[in-house]
Amino acid sequence: MTNEIKALAMPKWGLAMTEGAVTAWLVEEGATVREGDEILEIETTKITNVYESPIAGTLRRRNVEAGQTVPVGALLGVVADPGVPDADIDAFIARFQEEFAVEAAEAGEAAGPEPRFIDAGGRRLRYLVMGEGADGAVPLVLIHGFGGDLNNWQFNQPVLAEDRPVYALDLPGHGGSVKHGVEGGVPELAGTVRDFLNALGIRRAHLGGHSMGGAVALHLATEEPSRVASVTLVCSAGLGEEVNLDYIEGFIAAERRKEMKSVLEMLFADPSLVSRDMVEELLKYKRLDGVGAALRSIADAAFAGRRQAHVLAGRLGQVTAPVQAVWGAADRIIPAAHAKAVGDGRRHVFEGAGHMVHMEKSGELNRLISDFMTSA
């Protein structure tokens, strides 16, 4: 038995999140929870996701009711051994609420890390870094897919940063990075990631890439194998020729809310996860100067002839680092069958998830990546 009392606090998923609404508790007070158990659902302005317990023990209190909206960092619940007196739990909650109120007043809001900018190979790139880790911890670099940005890793980066630095960057033509002068496809983008590593003085890194970002990671691993500690491919391009060009062309062409929503619904096994804010944010991004030309150039180079132009499955032997593939079984953009290019035991296909498996099955993916990096 231990007298330790632990808090469950509202997480911060993404740069823009300042509050979240608890839509449902999945466990009752008094239940035993394990680390990683799904214990409640949280809705943000962009997406709804499950909250996994970061700690193990007995759920002694649920401080927020379903339907209630609270700021990032607010107390959601309390976990403690059953033998801890109720009076101690009450005192802990009172102290937490008092300290949280003071911190919120001082900060104005529960601020998180802010994105930074760096000149890499003559290009201005935006990136977000979280975590520090022990001396010598090999960092992880996360690379988004076509039309995405660093916020695509909002459910992964904070968790994976618990024991190492984790960088998420915007590729050229995307997010807050440079929009002009983008000409090529996967090799050019891989060169940009190499320049990004050089600019930050990162000699060796784990790589995680989603969709087109997976092909970028794999290309870099074939070109500079000594710099790569492991590669996690998430619904990755580069392992076969098939790709859903209706999505690619639909994303480029979409100018109205209805068109964009229809395109984005292809990404998820559960289309209801596409929120109004998600649609609006992408339309706002697409209106930025240079975005249309950049997306067109990348698509023409990466998906010429309505197929993937840069297939690396035959070059996996050149990668000295371990490679794993993770897929959503309901992926409608790149077939889950492409995971077969990776060896047995290193491919994982999740039911109930689509192309955004890192959002729809974030807990499972985070554990796979964390364990994979540890064993690499």
Image: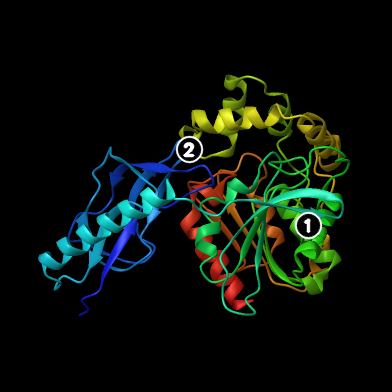
Q: In this image, 79 relative to 198: left or right?
A: left
**At which x and y percent is residue 224?**
84, 68
Q: Quadrant of residue 204?
A: bottom right
Which residue in the structure is indicated by mark 1?
193
Q: Residue at x 77, y 29 (%)?
A: 289
Q: Residue furthest front?
A: 106
Q: Earlier in the sequence, mark 1 or mark 2?
A: 1
Closest to the observer, 81 or 132: 132
Please say if 8 is above or below 241: below
How crowded pointer 2 is (Cα within 10 Å; few <14, some 14-19, many 20+) is rated as some
Residue 175 is tagged as none
Please say if 212 is above or below 220: above
Q: Nearer the viewer, mark 1 or mark 2?
A: 1
Q: Secondary structure at mark 2?
A: loop
**At which x and y percent is residue 248?**
72, 33
- Tag 2: residue type? Asp
Q: Residue at x 21, y 59 (%)?
A: 93
**At which x and y percent is residue 207?**
69, 63
Q: Quadrant of the N terminus?
A: bottom left
Q: Secondary structure at mark 1?
A: helix
Does residue 209 show up? no
Q: In this image, 272 relative to 337: left or right?
A: left
Please say if 242 is above or below 78: above
Q: Quadrant of residue 91?
A: bottom left
Q: In this image, 352 relative to 372: left or right?
A: left
- Tag 1: residue type? Val
Q: Quadrant of the C terminus?
A: bottom right
Which residue in the structure is indicated by mark 2?
270
Closest to the observer, 226 or 320: 226
